[in-house]
Each structure stands twice: as structure tokens, then as C-alpha cells.
Image (tube, grey):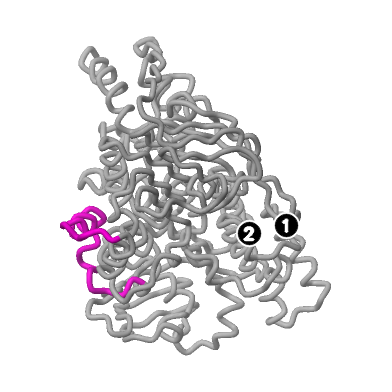
């Protein structure tokens, strides 16, 4: 008997005219590691809510079909008992945090279960140790970074020791090292304890190889399900982008076997390519900037609790530069971005933007500088998506000369023009928030995790958009944990550690020399075909040589 079995599952959100799920027939075996992927708005999160028993009880709407858990109708199960069996982590951790301190948040669910204090203490300590939260156990949850909040939400669920973990993009705010650590922990829970894992994820390079089976969703339906290798071949043949770079590379060139790990990819590289055919790339020459847009001179910033978030930061951003800011959670990336925007006043040093000194705090009172924070809900006040964009224009006294239509089209938001932005998915709200600042045509664009919740096609569109803006002279600085996005679109990379810049240079120089902050293709090619970071670079450099060797043979 499968652990889960859905029969013709169909669901409409309240007042929804289009079904969020349509005729889904899916079985999930106990102990399986199931990866669910697909485009933004394809129904992934809705399916997760159904499996956790939240739909239709909590969200309402119209529900059709049947879903069984261990042979019992999920809709008729006692919700208290189901909560002990199934744990879920949502995309937005702030919606899941209810207590004021880290330790109290982890213990909250256990208290509701009525566990003895000794057992609660053991579980809390164990989970904090697993997720490296011990040092912040007394911290006020509202003061945590986005990544720390995400880890805390995960810890609170793991402490419940459920049989099923439903994880809705749990690594979206984690840096590459923390994301790998967490996913490896999840894999251990699956392999060593037999937990069933249902993982919804957009960044497949992190988790594709961990899954026993992959389900691809599209338009509320299951488009395909199979092993990672099977999905790779099927998707590449149909030009569907939901495949990580290494698997996509070998599928694109028609290799008989498809690797799903970097290790397997390196083995195929060694056995099928001659490294002597690939001379090292010449280092890129850094052009002298003609126009300086932002300058930070020996900037320090200390929070009221005494934590030094920025230490001796000196950087210059030229007109048209596209800079990616990488670093671990808590390294000071968001603080640095807010200081650039004039939202935080440095304790020492100077911040100059387009000739104006922002060191005393307070951003310029015009539209030349735009800042997008991690939380898109901070930007959503109007009743429709269109009104959000028009509100920005009104605030700055700017006319709508067609820019609203242009931005909605570029960010694939035309169909949501009349929709209430708070009714949209997390990724869709992120795009609306981004659109609301882009309509002002800023000259300095500061983005904090702009790709969060975005699928491959939407990230490609966003990358093309910011690249186009940089060609028009707009300076773009974006904080991201998405190394693949940075490698594809940034021209320069800054690496921040403990409030200090430890690396600053062209992307091939910084990412090519990094172990953890590198792309999947870069890890595969390191030490063999140096200078290759992206799928397109691998296709350009490796395929001609491989094709020539095949012809000779």
C-alpha cells in the first residue's frame, strides 16, 4: 500500500476560476525521496498543502477527488494526529514563526504535543546542533536574517520528528554551504531513519541527485514522473528547462548515460575528453570605469546590540556594472545593500551615490535609486498588480508612458494585471514587487535575493532584463545565493565574509577559484577545463572537441 495515493485530485482556490490542481493521480511510497519541480504557479505548493492536510480545511475552496494517507481518507483524519505524522515547511518562513526566541520557537510544537520537559529539551538541543543554531538560541526571531528564519522554521518541524517531511523550497534563502548541509541532513533522515521526503525545489543543481523520483508539474497537472536520468532525457528532448546543468549538458550532446552528480560528470569528462585540447583561458582585462555611480569609502556599520555587520568596506560601482554579492547567511550582505541605498547610516566612512552623500542616512528623494528587500510583502499595498505599479509612478510624479505594460510583459505578469498581489504565489509576489520599483527607471538598482521563488524560465527573463538595463547604463547590485544566476549574468562578483569583502573581481576569477561558491559546471570542469562556469561555456568549449574526436574514431 502506498503511503499517499491521490485519485483524480482537483482543487480550486476560493473564487478561483481556474483549477490550481487538475486530475492528479499520484502515488508516493513510504521512505521515498520525491522531488517535485515545475514552473512558478504550476501547482507545486498547492499539492504540498494538500499532502499536509491544509487543503481544503485551512484554505477553503472547491475540492474534488480523493487523497489517501496509509489507506485512510486524508480529509477525514484527525488533524492533531496528522500533524504528528506530517511536517511541512513553507516558502516564507515568517508565516511559520510564532514565538519570540529561537529556542522557544523550536519547542512550541513539542509543547502543543504535551511532551515531557526532558524529552523536549533533548529534541530542541539535538535539532539546534544539527542546524547550527545553538549560538543564536536566545535571539529575538524578528532580528534574524532571512536565511536564519528559514533554518529556524526547518528546525521547528524536525523537532516534531514526523514520518513525512514536506519541504516547500526550504533552501531558497540559504547560502550554498548551508543549503548543501541541510539537504545532506534531509537525505540522511531519509536513508538512515526512513523518513519520507517530499521536496519542492527550483534550484535543481542542489537536490536532483538526491531524489529517487522526480515529478514535473505544469498548469496544475503532473506532466512527467520518472528517475532523474529519465526526466533529463525527456525534458532536454522537448527543450524543457527543469534539469540541472551537468545532466543537461550530457543530455544535450547525446551521451548514452546521464550523470546526476558532479562526480559522475567528472568521470565522464575524464574518459571522453582530452584535456590537452583545452588551453587555459586568458584572464579577462578589467575595463576602467568612465562614470562612477556608487562609492563606499572605509564604511563600518554596527547594530545596537554591538554586532559589527560591516568592517572597512571600500568599493566603487561604475555605470552599467552588474555586480553579484555572495556570502554566507549573516555575512552582512543585506546590511551592505541597505547602506548603499541610504537606508542605514554607517558608523564610520562615506557612501556616495551619483554625487550625493548618503552617509547621514536617508535615501535620495527621487527615483534614481531603487531597493528591493527580501520580503516582497513589504511592497504590496494596492488591490491590483497594475495599481501597485501606478502607485510608484504617482509617488515620484512620473507619467505612465507605456512603462507599466512594458514591465508587466517583461516579468510575465500581464495575466495578473487585475489580480490582488497578495493572492499570488511567493514567486509571483516577488516579481510584482520587482516590477513596482522598475517602473521608475532607476539608475542604481539594488536587489536582495531577486530570484527567490523563481523558476528557470523566469530567472532567465530576469537575467536578460537586468543585463539589458546594465547595457543602458543602469548599475545593478544584487544579493543572491544563486551562484548559477550570478555566473550566467553578473560581470563582477563580490564575496562577503563576516562583514568584510574577501574577494572582488570578474566572475570567472572569483567563482572559478572558489570551491563552494562555484557553479555545478564549474565544479565538474575544475582542474580539467579551467575557465568554464556555465552550460553555454561548456557547450562552446567541450562539444567541438568531443565531436572532432568522435569523427576521427
Where on the picture, by quarter, is residue 142? bottom right
Near-viewer residue (432 or 14): 432
Q: Give the range drawn in magenta.
A: 397-421
Near-viewer residue (104 or 362): 362
Residue 411 belongs to magenta span? yes
Q: In this view, does 13 lie above or below 145?
A: below
> In x, y percent, where is residue 178?
59, 47
Is residue 70 something one can see in this rendering?
Answer: yes
Near-viewer residue (97 or 367): 367
Q: In this view, does 509 lie above or below 13?
A: above
> In x, y percent, where is residue 427?
37, 61
* Residue at 31% in and 43% down: 466
- Circle 1 — which element? helix
Tell me if label 1 and label 2 are in contact, CB under 8 Å: yes
Label 2 neighbourhood size at 10 Å, few (<14), some (14-19), many (20+)? some
Query: In this view, which residue lies farthest toward the left?
Result: 402
Q: Mark 2 points at which residue?
A: 144
Near-viewer residue (208 or 352): 352
> In x, y percent, where is residue 474?
32, 40
Q: Which of the numbered marks, if any, corresponds to residue 39?
A: none
* Residue at 45% in and 74% down: 51
> In x, y percent, where is residue 199?
47, 60
* Residue at 50% in and 42% down: 357
Locate residue 19 relative to residue 28 in the image: left or right.
left
Residue 368 belongs to magenta span? no
Amino acid at each position: 500500500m502506498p503511503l499517499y495515493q491521490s485519485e483524480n485530485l482537483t482543487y480550486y482556490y476560493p473564487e478561483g476560476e481556474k483549477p490550481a490542481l487538475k486530475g492528479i493521480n499520484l502515488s508516493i511510497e513510504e521512505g521515498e525521496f520525491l522531488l517535485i519541480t515545475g514552473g512558478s504557479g504550476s501547482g507545486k505548493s498547492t499539492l504540498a498543502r494538500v499532502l499536509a492536510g491544509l487543503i481544503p480545511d485551512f484554505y477553503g475552496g472547491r475540492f474534488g477527488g480523493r487523497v489517501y494517507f496509509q489507506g485512510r481518507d486524508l480529509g477525514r483524519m484527525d488533524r492533531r494526529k496528522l500533524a504528528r505524522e506530517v511536517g511541512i515547511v513553507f516558502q516564507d518562513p515568517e508565516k511559520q514563526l510564532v514565538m519570540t526566541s529561537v529556542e522557544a520557537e523550536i519547542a512550541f510544537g513539542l509543547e502543543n504535543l504535551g511532551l515531557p520537559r526532558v524529552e523536549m529539551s533533548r529534541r530542541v538541543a539535538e535539532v539546534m546542533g544539527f542546524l547550527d543554531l545553538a549560538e543564536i538560541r536566545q535571539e529575538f526571531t524578528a532580528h534574524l536574517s532571512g536565511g536564519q528564519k528559514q533554518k529556524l522554521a526547518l528546525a521547528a518541524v524536525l523537532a516534531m520528528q514526523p514520518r513525512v517531511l514536506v519541504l516547500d523550497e526550504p533552501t531558497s534563502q540559504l547560502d550554498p554551504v548551508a543549503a548543501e548541509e541541510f539537504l545532506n541532513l534531509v537525505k540522511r533522515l531519509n536513508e538512515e531513519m526512513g523518513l519520507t521526503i517530499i521536496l519542492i525545489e527550483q534550484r535543481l543543481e542542489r537536490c536532483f541527485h538526491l531524489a529517487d523520483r522526480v515529478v514535473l508539474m505544469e498548469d496544475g497537472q503532473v506532466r512527467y514522473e520518472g528517475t532523474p536520468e529519465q526526466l533529463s532525457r525527456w525534458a532536454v528532448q522537448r527543450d524543457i528547462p527543469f534539469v540541472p546543468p551537468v545532466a543537461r549538458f550530457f543530455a544535450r550532446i547525446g551521451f548514452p548515460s546521464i550523470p546526476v552528480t558532479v562526480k559522475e560528470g567528472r568521470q565522464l569528462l575524464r574518459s571522453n575528453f582530452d584535456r590537452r585540447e583545452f588551453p587555459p583561458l586568458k584572464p579577462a582585462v578589467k575595463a576602467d570605469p568612465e562614470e562612477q555611480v556608487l562609492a563606499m569609502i572605509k564604511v563600518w556599520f554596527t547594530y545596537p546590540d554591538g554586532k559589527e555587520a560591516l568592517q572597512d568596506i571600500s568599493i566603487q560601482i561604475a555605470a552599467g556594472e552588474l555586480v553579484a554579492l555572495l556570502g554566507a547567511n549573516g555575512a552582512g550582505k543585506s546590511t551592505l545593500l541597505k547602506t548603499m541605498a541610504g537606508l542605514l547610516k554607517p558608523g564610520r566612512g562615506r557612501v556616495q551615490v551619483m554625487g550625493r552623500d548618503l552617509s547621514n542616512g536617508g535615501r535620495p528623494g527621487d527615483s534614481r535609486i531603487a531597493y528591493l528587500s527580501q520580503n516582497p510583502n513589504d511592497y504590496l499595498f494596492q488591490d491590483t498588480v497594475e495599481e501597485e505599479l501606478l502607485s510608484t509612478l504617482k509617488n515620484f510624479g512620473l507619467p505612465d508612458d507605456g512603462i507599466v505594460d512594458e514591465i508587466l510583459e517583461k516579468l510575465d505578469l500581464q495575466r495578473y494585471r487585475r489580480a490582488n498581489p497578495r493572492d499570488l504565489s511567493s514567486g509571483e509576489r516577488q516579481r510584482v514587487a520587482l516590477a513596482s520599483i522598475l517602473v521608475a527607471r532607476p539608475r542604481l538598482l539594488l536587489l536582495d535575493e531577486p530570484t527567490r521563488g523563481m523558476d528557470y524560465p523566469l530567472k532567465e527573463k530576469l537575467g536578460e532584463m537586468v543585463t539589458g538595463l546594465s547595457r543602458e547604463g543602469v548599475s545593478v547590485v544584487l544579493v543572491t545565493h544563486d551562484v548559477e544566476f550570478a555566473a550566467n549574468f553578473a560581470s563582477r562578483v563580490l564575496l562577503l565574509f563576516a562583514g568584510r569583502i574577501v574577494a572582488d573581481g570578474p566572475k570567472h576569477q572569483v567563482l572559478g577559484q572558489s570551491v563552494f561558491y562555484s557553479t555545478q559546471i564549474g565544479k565538474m570542469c575544475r582542474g580539467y577545463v579551467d575557465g568554464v562556469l556555465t552550460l553555454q561555456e561548456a557547450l562552446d568549449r567541450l562539444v567541438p572537441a568531443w565531436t572532432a574526436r568522435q569523427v576521427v574514431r
